[in-house]
Image (cartoon, rainbow, N blue to C red):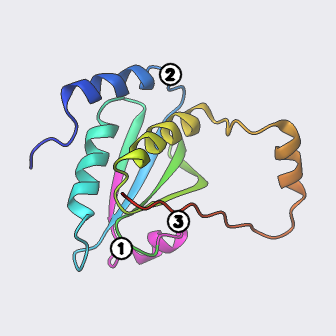
Amino acid sequence: MEELLNEQIREQVKEVFANLEHPVQVLFFASKEGCDYCPDTQKLLEEVTALSDLLGLSVFDLETDQATALRYKIDKAPGFTIAAKDGEIIVDYGIRYFGIPSGHEFTSLINDLVMVSSRNSGLSQETVDFFKTLEQPVVLQVYTTPT
């Protein structure tokens, strides 16, 4: 398969990744059936995570790795989560992507990798303290449509 990222994009991403602080693990879930974008999404994630030694990629099959998919709340493919890695421990921050992160979503992917690496959401302390008072889980979903 041909490279998805050209040299100019790879160099720009490497510059951004110079700010990575801690290891990050991307957990990607594909499906062998009915997943037109799985191969391209996997290829894109392979190319991006290869740009820094602090980034890792684990690849799973949605059907055969159901327990892992359930653990990370991935219920469709292509889907992936961006998690912190602390030694062998994976720390899930709840960041999920479904579909291929192309176009504007590519920038969000790169920013999320940097944010998880910094272990800092960028939220104010007041907001963090408010979230700690919540007694039930809150699901925030952002949808984008390619145009």
Secondary structure of the residue carrying tag 3 is loop
Secondary structure of the residue carrying tag 2 is loop
Looking at the rendered structure, the kind of residue marked 2 is Asn
The residue range painted magenta reads: 58-74
Q: Which residue is mark 2?
A: 19
Q: Is residue 47 left or right of residue 139?
A: left
Q: Is residue 60 left or right of residue 91?
A: left
Quarter of the image with the C terminus is: bottom left
In this view of the protein, can residue 87 be seen by the observer? no
Cα–Cα gap, marks 2 and 3: 27 Å
- Seen from this angle, which residue lies furthest left? 1
Q: Earlier in the sequence, mark 1 or mark 3?
A: 1
Q: What's the residue at 29%, 22% (across, down)?
A: 11
Q: Earlier in the sequence, mark 2 or mark 3?
A: 2
Q: Is residue 55 above or below residue 143?
A: above
Give residue 91's position: percent from left, percent from top.
Answer: 59, 50
User: What label sits on residue 72 in the rendered view?
Assistant: 3
User: What label sits on residue 62 in the rendered view?
Assistant: 1
Give residue 10's position: percent from left, percent from top.
Answer: 27, 28
Q: What's the residue at 52%, 65% (across, down)?
A: 72
- Label count reads 3
Of tags 2 and 1, the one toward the viewer is: 2
Q: What's the residue at 19%, 43% (across, down)?
A: 4
